[in-house]
Image (tube, rainbow, N blue to C red):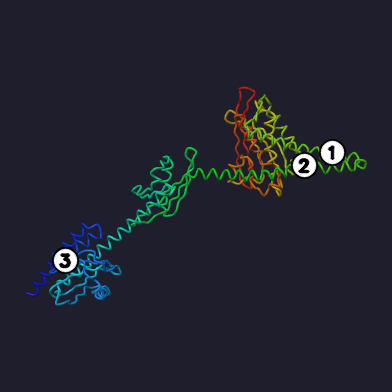
Amino acid sequence: MKEETYDHQTNKLLLLLSILIMEFSNSKEEKDVLLSLLNLVKRTVNVSDALLIDEKKRVILGREIDVSRFEEFIDWSLRQASPTFVEDSGNYVGIVPIVKLENFFGSLIVFMDHQPSMEEMEIFKIFSFLSAVVLENIRLYRELEGTYDYLSTILNSLPEGIFVYSNNGVRFQNKKFEEENFPEDVLEEAISISEEAISFKVERTGEIESDGEYFSIVSVPLFYNGEVQALTIVENVTASKELERLKRIDRMKTEFVANISHELRTPLAAIKAYAETIYNSLGELDSETLGEFMKVILDQSNHLESLLDELLDFSRLERRALQINKEEVNICELIESAVDAIREFASSHGVKVFFERKVPCTKVKVDKKRMKQVLLNLLNNGVKYSKKDASEKYVKVILDRDDEGTLIIVEDNGIGIPEHAKEKIFERFYRVDSSLTYEVSGTGLGLAITKEIVELHGGKIWVESKEGEGSKFFVWIPEDHGDNTVGQNS
C-alpha cells in the first residue's frame, strides 16, 4: 500500500514537472516566468492566495500586502535557501525563496489554511528550483545577447575587414569585410593565409599588392568547440605605405642636403686653400710647386663642376626635361674612352680597370655624352666601393649582346649591395649605408640619373649583387632605327 502511494506521488510530481517545463518553455522574459509560476501554484497546490515579491521585498505579482511583517522570515528562508512556513492567526504563511546558489530572484509568498504536507513542500521546492534555473538562464542569455551586441558593435566599427574562417568556409564577417569588396586576388590570399594558420596552428601574416593598392593580412588560430579556426584581419595599408614612402623621401632629402653641402664644401675648401697659398707666396713658389698647386685647383674645379652638372641633371630629371641626342657611335671606342677617363682615379684606390669584349665592336645609336656619363657613374661606384683590405681589386666592363640589343656589364669585386637595398639603389637620394656618406663621396643621385638616361634610350638597367662579394650592373640598350633626337619635356 505504501509502495502504491509512493508511485502515485512520484507520478504526480512528474506530471507537475512536465506542466512546469511546458509553461516555462514559452517564457522569454522574467515576468512571464514568475507569472507562470504564480498561476501554477494556484492551480496545483491548495493555497488560499499567493503573491510574488522581488529582491527588494516589493510585491510584483498578486495583491498588495504589508510584507514588512514577514521580513525576518523572508531573510531566514533566503539564508536557508529553503521554503519556510510560519503560523499566522490559525493559518499558515509560506515563504518560498527563488534562489540558485548566490543568485536571488525574489520570493513566492503563499497563504494556506492548513500546515503543508511533505508532498506540498516537495512541490514548492521543485517550483522554486526550476524557476530559479529558468530565470538564471534568461538573465545569462540577456547578458550574452548584450555582450554579443556590444562585441558586434565593436567589430563592425573597426576600420579593418575581419572574418573567421574554418575548414567549412567563412563563419563570421564584420560589416567592413562585407562592404569593402576586396579584390578577388586579395580574398584568395586571405583564405590561403587563414588555411595556413589553421594547418600550422600559428599566426601567419602576408602582404599583397592589387591594382596599385597594398593590403596587409594577419591570421591567428582560434580554438573553438574543439575545432581550429582562423581569425583573419584584412587591411588596406596603401595610405600608410604612401606616408612611409614620403617620410623616407623626406629623410633622404635631409641627408642629401647635408651630404651635398659636404660634397660642395670639400673642393671649394681645397681650391680656396691652394689659391690663398699661391696668392700669399707667389714670389716664393718655384714653377714645379706652382704647377702642382694649379693642378690641384684644376682637379678640384673639375670635381666641383661634375657635382654641379649632377645637380643640374637632377633638376632636369625633376622637371622631366632631361634630353638625349642620339648619333651613331662605335661602342668599343665609347667604353674605352670611359675606362681611360677613370683609370687614374682607379689607380689611386689600387683598383685595376679593364675592358673585355665578348662580341665584335659595332656602331650603336646613343647619346655619346650621356652614355659615357652612365659608364663613368657605374665605374666610379665600382672604384669607390671597392674593398679596402682586398689583395686584388678590379672593375671591368664587358661588352655583349642580348635580345636584339647591346648589353654592357660593369662588374666589380667590391663590398657588394645588401639584399634589402637592391630595389632602392636607383631611387633619388638613396645611399645604401648612410654611415659611408662622408667616407665615400657622392650625392646619391648618380644611379637615379643613370637609370633615367638608360630608360630615355628605351633600355633598362638592373643589378646582381651579393654583400661582400661584389656587384654586376647590366645596361641593355635596344637597337634603334628611329629619330636621332629623343627627349622628355615638361
**Percent position (x, y) of residue 424?**
59, 42
SS of the residue under disc 1: helix
Question: Under tag 2, what secondary structure?
Answer: helix
The disc, 3 or 2, on the residue closer to the chain's N-terminal end is 3
The alpha-carbon separation of the residues under discs 3 and 2 comes to: 106 Å
Give the residue at mark 2. Answer: 267
Q: Name the image quarter holding residue 312.
A: top right
On the picture, is 31 further left or further right than 467? left
434 relative to 101 in the view: left or right: right
Circle 1 residues within 10 Å: few <14, some 14–19, many ≥20 = some
Q: Which residue is mark 1?
A: 294
* Residue type at numbered disc 3: Val
Depth order, front residue of 394/19:
19
Element at label 3: helix
Marks 1 and 2 sit apart, C-alpha to C-alpha, by 13 Å
Q: Badge 3 local density, few (<14 within 10 Å), some, or many (20+)?
A: many
